[in-house]
Amino acid sequence: MSWFTDDADEGDYAEFDESSARVRPNPKANRPRSKNRPEHADAVAGRVFSVDRGRYGVWVDENTPDERQLIATRARELGKKSVVTGDWVDLVGDVSGDEGSLARIVRIQPRSTLLRRSADDTDSVERIIVANADQMLIVVAAADPEPRPRLVDRYLVAAFDAGIAPILCITKTDLADPAGFLGNFAGLDLRIIESRSDAFPIEAIRAALEGHTTVAVGHSGVGKSTLVNALVPEAHRAVGRVNTVTGRGRHTSSSTISYRVGSGWIVDTPGVRSFGLGHVDPASILKSFTDLALVAEDCPRGCTHLPDSPDCAIIERAAAGGLGKIGAQRLDSFQRLITTLGSAP
């Protein structure tokens, strides 16, 4: 059958002839996937407080009569974006919070801070610990296990790199005098809270946490989870003893989870024995050594502050005794970090 009339040449309409068109069959008989994603204008905002094997605990409508906890999963449109404890997210689906309900996280809101670490200093792959924290509570024991000033230095570097204010809480002060250890940080503008092994200064710690999101970090066995349980009795975080042979703590907390403390939040993290800084720009390390940073203002451009650096104001001040014993220790710690990273600020 021809669609052309006798009055017109068939070639005049060839471009409109679809008889030779090749149509790809659709064996599934479904509609092609659209690249347009829904806007989810009715999404509900919430704060992630726990992450467990693809399921996310989320607080919704905080500090209102309708506040509730939800269990959520990741929506497909998030792609490879990771959702971490502390994230503010947008949810759709069943947001009732009823038993058996499951919402979907469709968006991650912009993060104000991001605390990260790497497996070691040579590993550039970062591991996100928590998002949107504005304080870091560094928990260290005066004894059992012995305090590690170099590890605390690394926590400080990570905190300043992320723009998080550090607080040092030293526990078990009834077992050993912490004065010598604390002397390592005398040059820093660092808030210090001391605690006995049999009694935490709960009110002082609560006051420090009020209105803040605080991530608690520390070596295994220093009493971090014990402190969290004292602040939040219903947390029931597992605690362990220090090995009497190795002097090392046993890993007990295996997940990162946040708990509400008054108007603030405390985020308990698994204990670590190392804290890699492979992701940190060496140029930001000096910021955590505020006492040395002031002296470094007189250094020549491009100064590395390492022992072989010519005309380094910090090294010259230390050689003349101008930094004192504490300042010299701080310089040594700073240089060790720079050397370990294999780069200069």
Image (cartoon, rainbow, N blue to C red):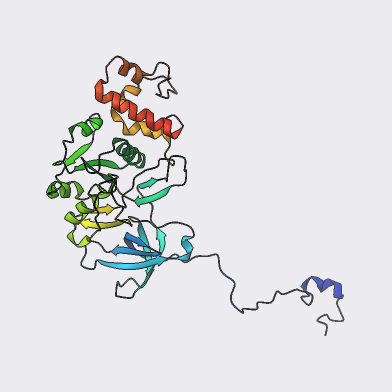
| 114 up-or-down from 191: above or below | below
Residue 10: % across, % down? 86, 75
Question: In the displayed structure, does residue 133 sit left or right of residue 110?
Answer: left
Residue depicted at x 34% and y 68%:
71
- Spot the residue most to the top: 320
Residue depicted at x 33% and y 30%:
333
Residue 264: % across, % down? 22, 53
Question: In the displayed structure, does residue 178 sit left or right of residue 151?
Answer: left
Quarter of the N terminus within the rendering: bottom right
Q: Is residue 35 visible?
A: yes
- Report which quarter residue 191 is drawn in: top left
| 161 up-or-down from 300: above or below | below
Q: Nearer the viewer, residue 281 or 218?
A: 218
Residue 319: % across, % down? 32, 16
Quarter of the C terminus within the rendering: top left
Residue depicted at x 36% and y 39%:
161
| 129 up-or-down from 155: above or below | below
Q: Is residue 293 visible?
A: no
- Spot the residue most to the front: 245
Residue depicted at x 41% and y 19%:
300
